[in-house]
Amino acid sequence: MNLKKNIAIALVFIIMSACTASKNDGIVRVSGVIKNPIPQGEIILERFEVGQVVPVATVNADSDGKFEIKTKISEPGFYRINVYGQQFEILVLDKEDITITADGQGGQMIESKGTEDQKRLAEVQDYMEAYSHVVRDFNERYSQAQQSGDIAKIDQLVEEGTSLEAGKVKDLKAMAWKMDGSIVPLMVTDYFPDKSQEYKFLDSLGQKLQKELPNSSQVEMFVSNLDFFKPAVQIGDIAPEISLPNPDGEMVNLSDLRGKYVLLDFWAGWCGPCRQENPNIVAMYNKYNKDGFEVFGVSLDRTRDKWLSAIAEDGLIWPSHVSDLKYFQSEAAMTYKVNAIPFALLLDPEGRVIGKNLRGKVLQDKLASIFE
């Protein structure tokens, strides 16, 4: 299945391995049947390591398609069975043997069974396969709305898409949390669209897994890498100062807007989703500016012309526009760990964060709750 190939690719980047004290010195057997075997066709057991997939053992099936691979396992790890370079199945190898069934040449079906972790992997794969169909239907409807210029429908679909992703993350978190004593949750978290948004959950999951699998190098690597996803600013924090030049080259400070409710908006002229959200921000600014609402726009553009053209074209009439024209290497972007835009924070009059990534109707409702 293509989904399994995608999972395999993702695992190369999210699953880390290292040498640690041995937990299990037993031998695990991976055996099975290839229904349509290729004479001398290779069946390879591969292990996921840092940034790569490493071959562990290679065998050929017999004339009946039967094969067996024996390997020594010191701790639970992510592996992959590779049939002729055409069919792939993710495996978690620990203490129990696993059985493989595959179509072989010209086929697509490949299955594994024999352990609880394989059932857990199948649960994740089945969920994401079903979700991919939902996303495909959503993308078709969104494309149709764009082609017809139906702004109201687009706004509705944006809300629906946000809800779909939130629901997916909620389901995946529940799925990962219930998988006690397993490294499969490490794979589940790869499907979080923004790990920084889920840092608290990831941190809690890491602590849980450390208790359940105290000798796992993969869990330790997962935990040690969590700081990368820790948000620079969380709800309740005072937003760090930003001092950058405006279009006239004058330095402007975020703290100059203390006493106001401020939408700190990271955007760029080249960012399509940012430009789509701009009319909503303009409408909110026009509606609530007199009541104490301001926008502090931080552009991640590379050129001044692109930045100023977007300001003019989108009617961004608030005075607080700043940029050092350094793209994602912007001083402000690095301070706030911004690696994707649009990204916005809502600040109270004391400069404290009271909302993150509020867009569309969600931003409208939040501002209405404050000012109305």
Image (tube, rainbow, N blue to C red):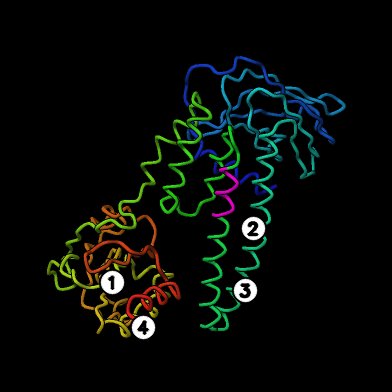
Residue 73 quadrant: top right
Look at the numbered discs 2 and 4 and tell me whether their residues touch, using CB distance below 8 Å: no
The residue under label 3 is: 141
- Say if 351 sits above or below 97 in the image: below
Helix, strand or loop at label 2? It is helix
- Say if 87 sits above or below 351 in the image: above
The residue under label 4 is: 283
Q: Is 251 in front, or is 172?
A: 172
The residue lying at 27 percent from left, 73 percent from top is 295
- Between the residue at mark 2 and the residue at mark 4, the CA separation in whole angstroms equals 34 Å
Residue 127 located left or right of residue 243: right
Number of the front mark, 2 or 1:
2
Q: Position of residue 272 (x, y in %)?
A: 43, 70
- Between the residue at mark 4 and the residue at mark 1, the CA separation in whole angstroms equals 20 Å
The residue lying at 49 percent from left, 54 percent from top is 193
Sequence-first tag of 2 and 1? 2
Number of the front mark, 2 or 4:
4
- Between the residue at mark 3 and the residue at mark 4, the CA separation in whole angstroms equals 26 Å
The amino acid sitting under disc 3 is Arg
Q: Is 278 in front, or is 345?
A: 345
Sequence-first tag of 3 and 2? 2
The residue under label 2 is: 132
Looking at the figure, which quarter contains the C terminus? bottom left
The residue under label 1 is: 307
The residue lying at 26 percent from left, 53 percent from top is 335
Q: Is residue 321 magenta?
A: no
Q: Position of residue 62 (x, y in %)?
A: 83, 24
Q: Is 62 in front, or is 297?
A: 297
